[in-house]
Image: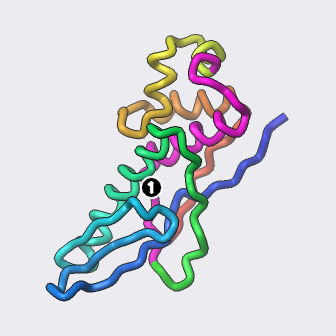
Amino acid sequence: MYDYMIMRYAYPVVLTSDSDGRVLASFPDVPEALTDGANQNEALAEATDALNAALAAYVQHDRPIPVPSAARGHKLVPLSAPVAAKLALYQAMRKQSISKVELARRLGVTETIARRLVDPDHASKIERVEAALEALGVDLVVEDVA
């Protein structure tokens, strides 16, 4: 039986101009993710990296991943697909109280490999992350937020 957990990994970003004319990007749901750019396009390009890095720190510190709030007129910044998949795995493991050791056992891999599957900073093949999600009864759905 599959356990359905719906999470969209796209967060509303607030863009504001500072006194120097730079555009600041902040995320109400992830206050640690802050960046800026010379203009709105540059700030948005930097925002994805800032968001990925901030949420990777949540994983490293074993904190729950914040649920994105409604956009309310703000642009949405989606996470990269590999990071979103790893966060889905991390959240499924937390919800089901599955340790990395147990994940490794279920997948028939070493604990080191299981740790890397959950680490947003480690490059993993998305097929391996999907296999880990499947082992936990979770489907990964990719959706266009545009």
Relative vertical location of residue 68 with respect to residue 75 in this rendering, above or below = above
In which quadrant of the rendered view does residue 99 lie? top right
Verify whether residue 85 appears in magenta.
Answer: yes
Which residue appears at 64% of the width and 34% of the height? 93
Q: Quadrant of the N terminus?
A: top right
The picture places residue 69, in percent across and down from the top left corner, at 59, 70
Look at label 1 and name its amino acid: Leu
Q: Is residue 98 left or right of residue 75?
A: right
Which residue appears at 69% of the width and 54% of the height? 6
Helix, strand or loop for disc 1: loop
Relative vertical location of residue 115 with respect to residue 73 in this rendering, above or below = above
In which quadrant of the rendered view does residue 104 lie? top right
Magenta span main SS = helix
Verify whether residue 80 appears in magenta.
Answer: yes
The picture places residue 19, in percent across and down from the top left corner, at 19, 88
Region of the chain picked out in magenta, as a range: 75-102
Colouring used for the render: rainbow
Which residue appears at 59% of the width and 17% of the height? 101
* Residue under label 1: 79
